[in-house]
Amino acid sequence: MPEPEEKRAEQAASAADDQIALYLHDPSPLVVKALLGNRRLTEEHVVVIAQRRNLPGDVLDSIVKDRRWIESYPVRLALSRNPKTPLFSALSLARYLRLFDLAAIARDHLLPVLYRRKIESIVIEKIPTLALGVKKSLAKTATGEILLALIQNGYPDVVNTCLDNPHLVEAHLYKVISRSTSTPGTIRSIANHRNWSSRYQIKFALIRNGQTPLSRSVQFLPDLKSRDLRELYRDPLLPPAVRPSIHRELMERGEDPASFAFQEEETVFEIEDSEVEEIEQEMRSYLDGNL
């Protein structure tokens, strides 16, 4: 029969070197807290405790507040990667972590979303000052907003590496294409990428971007649905050089762009004769009543 919790806590607090391991995985927070007060505890022991995801936040926070362990990088890292570490404490520790450890935390979907977004912000702050080689290495494994920031940074080699990153999603790339701040080189890289240039929504966005090479935009047009071509043709922000090619594509499909644009305008503003008579009668009544 296992010993009472209070007894185990008392034993953990004074356990000898060869007995400490017996209490590292004890299910009782009380026992673990008592163990953390043991002067024989080593960094390796504390890392094991800091990695435990079945401990309450106050136990982990007691490690953060202990001067013996707070300067230990392995302990900081373990606490920063533990979803049970209180958010404020985790963020205060994360500020002192290495770049690629931060990137790994941002990829960990077991961690709270808010925490991961904060970590992404820390990494993004560092990007402008990173060496090109470091940016390329980061581009291979980064996720989310970090990838987006690397692409926006505009270095061709970095952009190409980001485009090959399996974590890159279409929604992020759509944002890049839609932003006026994206460089021409970035847009060209996307337009010529073997994978992304075959995605329907990416093609649509690229056609609307004035930085996309005209030859690529023209190549994308046959793959678009007629309704999307009509939408592009009516879009006032469409690059002027692309409009004739859309006109030609629609004509080849048996549609007259000028005709349907004119008809749609007439449909919006057209008033039937009977409606004109009703309007005139209402106006006469209104005037007679105010004379």
Image: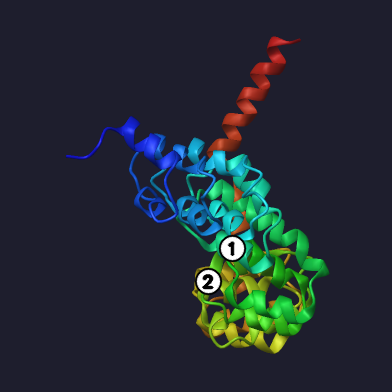
**Percent coordinates x, y for residue 258 in the rendering:** 64, 71
Q: How is the image coloured?
A: rainbow
Residue 134: quadrant of the picture = bottom right
Label number found at residue 144: 1
Question: In the image, what residue type sits under mark 2?
Answer: His
> Residue at the right extreme?
129
Q: Which one is nearer the viewer's eye here, 235 or 14? A: 14
**Percent coordinates x, y for residue 12 in the rendering:** 40, 42
Determine which residue is flagged by label 2. Answer: 167
Q: Is residue 17 toward the left or the right of residue 66 in the image?
A: left
- Residue drawn 54% across and 45% down? 39
Is there CB contact under 8 Å for labels 1 and 2? yes
Pick the quarter of the image with the N terminus: top left
Above or below, 201 against 97 in this view is below
**Percent coordinates x, y for residue 108 in the rendering:** 50, 60
Question: In the image, what residue type sits under mark 1?
Answer: Gly
Alpha-carbon span between mark 1 and mark 2: 8 Å
Q: Which one is nearer the viewer's eye here, 147 or 252? A: 147
- Residue drawn 56% across and 36% down? 275
Of the two numbered discs 1 and 2 on the same chain, state the one appearing first in sequence: 1
- Residue drawn 57% across and 60% down? 106
Label number found at residue 76: none
Counting other residues with Cα less than 10 Å from the Cα at mark 1, is it few (<14), some (14-19), or many (20 or more)?
some
Q: Is residue 59 toward the left or the right of residue 209 in the image?
A: left
Q: Which one is nearer the viewer's eye here, 208 or 26? A: 26
> Residue at the left extreme?
1
Above or below, 277 against 243 in this view is above
Asked whether residue 56 is in view, the answer is no
Q: Is residue 71 toward the left or the right of residue 21 in the image?
A: right
- Residue drawn 54% across and 71% down? 201
